[in-house]
Amino acid sequence: MQRMLAVGFALVAYILFFASFLWLIAFIGDVRIFPTTINDAVNGTPVVQAIGFDLLLIALFGIQHSVMARPGFKARLTRIVSTSVERSIYVLAAAVVLAIMLRYWHTLGGTIWDVRESAAAPLIWAVFAMGWALVLLSTFLINHFELFGLSQAWRHGRAREDRPPQLREPLLYRWVRHPLYLGFVIAFWATPHLTISHLLFAAGMTAYIFIGIAHEERDLLAHFGSAYDDYRKRVGMIVPGLGRRRDRSGD
């Protein structure tokens, strides 16, 4: 029964995260399918207060993602819950925090550019779609179902042990170390209608991405050691050839 509950919990967490992820796509694309969009959220708040509140929402998102992803937090959490649902708890928390950010985002007035009626708009939307496609493809390249906790719960349900993580370089990971984050950056900035509200969201989330990369790479280096250090020397961070770690030994 416990194993069945673990699988069920993992499925619920995955479905809720997937729903919040679809909301994020519609939110950034300013498509009114879910309760709010980036240019149609909470209105009427004084500008300074709205900016402060939005930055707090981004900080909340970043804290949840960074803190819960750290090995120390995972070790403490798995003293309370089974390792089979540890990742699913992270996924569920991410879905909740993301939904909070999207629901309570404060829209700011003002436009940086608006080319929705120009010939460039279809091309920009294609780049927008490419960014999200890159995100999705990247999750499957590194094991989509393990990333979202389904594999762990499934193996637990079938009384199989978790496999130790391996450092692999499938397809896109041969050119950039973080193609998933590259996809997010592309999707956040590719818009034919850049408003002040969209600019704040894109800039804030991009800043968090680079902070998150720094924490993630520190953990990966601690886990994989020289193998990951060599990977950083050979492969760019999110753009091919850029962000490679220089060999200070001069070799």
Image: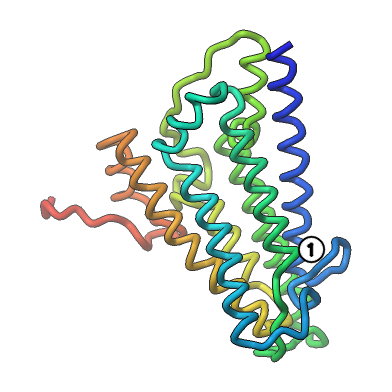
**The quadrant where residue 199 appears:** bottom right
Q: Is 168 left or right of 136, judged from the image as shown?
A: left
Image x and y of residue 26, in percent: 79, 63
Which residue sits at x=74%, y=11%?
Answer: 1
Q: Is residue 246 left or right of residue 83?
A: left
Say whether residue 67 is left or right of residue 85: left
Residue nearest the viewer, comparing 218 with 51: 51
Tell me if residue 64 comes above or below residue 85 in the rendering: below
Badge 1: few (under 14), some or many (20 or more) residues near its Cα, within 10 Å?
some
Please determine whether, in this image, residue 27 is positioned above or below residue 153. Answer: below
> Quick one: SS at disc 1?
helix
Amino acid under disc 1: Ala
- The residue drawn where x is 63% and y is 53% is 134
Counting from the top left corner in percent of width and height, residue 112 is at 65, 89
Q: x%, y% of residue 133?
A: 68, 53
The residue under the point 72% across, 22% down is: 7
- Identify residue for label 1: 26
Of residues 249 and 36, the one nearer the viewer is 36
Q: What residue appears at the point 69 percent right and 14 percent down from the top-left corner? A: 2
- The image's colour scheme reads rainbow
Q: Quadrant of residue 14?
A: top right
Q: Position of residue 151 (x, y in %)?
A: 63, 25
Instruction: Give the mark count.
Output: 1
Q: Where is 120 relative to 84, above or below?
A: below
